[in-house]
Image: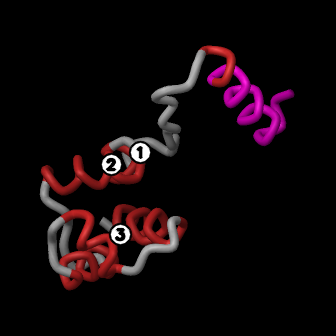
């Protein structure tokens, strides 16, 4: 559960959102977001799906089942997707 709470908080902070802003986007209370981030409770399955969509990551990532993050490439052409893949490899040192 700790991994999930840390990932939710990190994803929220990376976007510069307050707990209240995330709560508003999910139509829940700020206290609910705070409970998740403190590791006091877990998001419901429905909220996990909403979080994954909102942050463009998988539910597996949020739950700590996988370490890989996904990048939403909707609307990009194949050339742009290939460029992103090359950049990711370069940043990993796989060039």
Q: Do callouts 1 and 2 mark residues in contact (Cβ within 8 Å)? A: yes
Question: How many angstroms separate mark 1 from mark 2 (CA)?
Answer: 5 Å
Sequence-wise first label, 1 or 2: 2
Task: State the residue at coordinates (40%, 47%).
Answer: 61
Sequence-wise first label, 2 or 3: 3
What secondary structure is the magenta-colored segment mainly? helix
Tell me the number on the disc at residue 57: 1
Q: Is residue 63 above or below residue 81?
A: below
Task: State the residue at coordinates (48%, 36%).
Answer: 72
| Residue 35 image offset from top left, x and y in percent | 23, 80
Q: Do callouts 1 and 3 mark residues in contact (Cβ within 8 Å)? A: no
Instruction: Specify the farthest residue to the top.
Output: 78
Q: Does the magenta stretch include residue 94?
A: yes
Q: Nearer the viewer, residue 95 or 17?
A: 17
Tell me the number on the disc at residue 76: none
Question: How many angstroms separate mark 1 from mark 3 (CA)?
Answer: 14 Å
Sequence-wise first label, 1 or 3: 3
Q: How many numbered marks appear? A: 3
- Give the magenta range: 81-95
């Amino acid at each position: 559960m700790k991994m999930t709470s840390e990932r939710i908080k990190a994803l929220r902070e990376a976007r510069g959102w307050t707990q209240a802003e995330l709560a508003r986007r999910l139509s829940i209370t700020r206290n609910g977001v705070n409970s998740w981030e403190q590791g006091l409770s877990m998001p419901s399955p429905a909220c996990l799906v909403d979080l994954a969509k909102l942050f463009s990551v998988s539910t597996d990532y949020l739950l700590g089942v996988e370490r890989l993050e996904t990048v939403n490439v909707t609307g990009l052409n194949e050339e742009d997707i290939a460029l992103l893949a090359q950049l990711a490899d370069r940043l990993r040192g796989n060039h």
